[in-house]
Image (cartoon, rainbow, N blue to C red):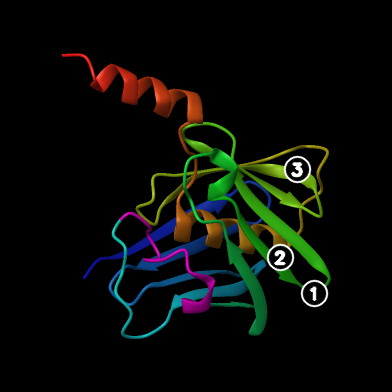
């Protein structure tokens, strides 16, 4: 059983806590200036160790934002970076966390880039960098931190993976 509780001081939203319990399959993000977000895996389901929350199957995940249910739709996480995207719909908004480099993912709200998150998939969100022109709000921050902690950030490009595969063929 692994429980990681990480205090974070966000540049715009102050102190908050990101907690990942890999055994229970639960991420909780809370702070004085943001709504509480809980993302949890169905009880009794087997966890995939490559994914911090334990699964990318939306049918096995429940997300609440400020105590209200939200729709969650993770991509399958296959060959392309965009396949690792995670979508959330709540309160008339659509968020997407999508990898854009090996270590980082972008958070978008309704198609507009808000900022970048970095997490190694260990429950700790190492960095949230907000764009100065984006004007993110507390709900944006809470959802972004939860998705980054639950699914990790970043992904290799298809070209990089293909090159690795070819290089592995030659001793």
- Give whichever of 88, 36 is nearer the camera: 88
**Number of residue marks:** 3
Seen in the picture, residue 2 relative to 69 is either above or below; the reply is above
Q: Does the magenta stretch include residue 55?
A: yes
- Under tag 1, what secondary structure? loop
Please name the residue shown 56% across and 56% down the image.
Answer: 75
Mark 1 is surrounded, within 10 Å at the Cα level, by few (under 14), some (14 to 19) or many (20 or more) other residues, namely few
Q: Position of residue 4 (x, y in %)?
A: 32, 62
**x and y percent of residue 78 in the render?**
47, 47
In screen coordinates, is 46 left or right of 157?
A: left
Question: Which quadrant does the C terminus fall into?
Answer: top left
Q: Quadrant of the N terminus?
A: bottom left
Q: Is mark 2 on a helix, strand or loop?
A: helix
Q: In this view, does 42 lie to the left or right of 71?
A: left
Range of magenta residues: 50-60
Q: Are marks 2 and 1 in contact (CB under 8 Å)?
A: yes
1 left or right of 163 in image: left
> Is tag 2's residue or tag 1's residue first in the polypeptide sequence?
1
Decide whether the magenta segment is chiefly helix, strand or loop. loop
Q: Which of 161 and 9 is in front in this view?
A: 161
- For the residues carrying marks 2 and 1, which lies nearer the camera in this image? 1
Q: Residue at x 21, y 14 (%)?
A: 170
Residue 23 spot, x, y in % from top left: 28, 73
Looking at marks 1 and 3 on the same chain, the residue that comes earlier in the sequence is marked by 1
Q: Element under label 3?
A: strand
Real-space CA distance between mark 2 and mark 1, rounded to the nearest whole angstrom: 10 Å
> Which residue, given by chain and number where applicable, does mark 2 sit on?
139
Q: Residue 91 carries which label?
A: 1
According to the picture, the residue beneath numbered tag 3 turns out to be 113
C-alpha span from label 1 to label 3: 18 Å
């Amino acid at each position: 059983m692994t429980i990681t509780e990480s205090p974070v001081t966000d540049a715009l939203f102050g102190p908050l806590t990101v907690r990942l319990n890999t055994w229970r399959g639960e991420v909780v993000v809370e702070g004085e200036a943001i709504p509480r977000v809980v993302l949890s895996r169905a009880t009794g389901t087997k966890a995939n160790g490559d994914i911090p929350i334990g699964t990318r199957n939306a049918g096995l995940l429940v997300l609440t934002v400020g105590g209200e249910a939200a729709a969650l739709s993770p991509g399958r996480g296959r060959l392309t970076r965009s396949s690792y995207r995670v979508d959330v719909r709540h309160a008339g908004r659509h968020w997407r966390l999508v990898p854009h480099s090996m270590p980082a993912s972008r958070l978008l709200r309704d198609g507009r880039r808000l900022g970048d998150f970095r997490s190694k998939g260990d429950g700790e969100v190492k960095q949230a960098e907000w764009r100065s022109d984006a004007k993110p709000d507390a709900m944006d921050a809470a959802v972004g931190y939860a998705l980054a902690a639950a699914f990790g950030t970043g992904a290799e490009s298809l070209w990089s993976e293909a090159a690795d595969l070819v290089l592995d063929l030659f001793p």
